[in-house]
């Protein structure tokens, strides 16, 4: 039974070995150019999409609530 445990541990270690050191990390860079800030991942631009939630409809302000 002890021999089976040793073999299983060896198999698990060998299965994990290729994924641990062969993967390169992405190169991330933030650059300030004449037209603004740019986020680069692996020397290519990355667009970050976002969302803003507000209680006022688009094109209105706080005066909208008083009417």
Image (cartoon, grey):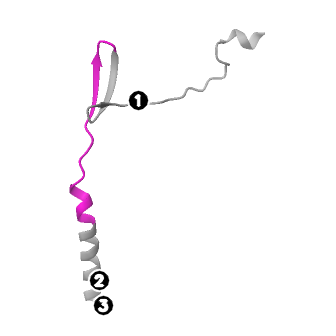
> 44 or 12: which is nearer to us?
44
**Residue 2's image quarter?**
bottom left
Report if the CB atoms under discs 2 and 3 are less than 8 Å apart: yes
Residue 5's disc number: 2
Farthest residue in the bottom direction? 1
Farthest residue in the front direction? 44
Q: Establish if 51 lies above or below 2.
A: above
Instruction: Report whether 47 appears left or right of 10.
Output: right
Percent position of residue 19, x then y: 27, 59
Cα separation, mark 3 vs mark 1, equals 55 Å
The residue labelled by disc 3 is: 1
Q: Quadrant of the C terminus?
A: top right
Percent position of residue 49, x then y: 47, 30
Percent position of residue 3, x then y: 25, 88
Instruction: Mark 3: give few (<14), some (14-19) or many (20+) Cα within 10 Å.
Output: few
Cα separation, mark 2 vs mark 1, equals 49 Å
Q: Secondary structure at mark 1?
A: loop
The residue labelled by disc 1 is: 47
| Highlighted range, magenta | 16-35
Q: Establish if 57 lies above or below 43.
A: above
């Amino acid at each position: 039974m002890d021999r089976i445990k040793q073999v299983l541990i060896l198999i698990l270690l060998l299965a994990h070995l290729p994924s641990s050191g062969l993967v390169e990390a992405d190169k991330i860079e933030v650059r300030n150019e004449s037209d603004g800030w740019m986020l680069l991942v692996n020397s290519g631009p990355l667009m970050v999409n976002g969302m803003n939630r507000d209680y006022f409809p688009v094109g209105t302000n706080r005066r909208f609530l008083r009417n």
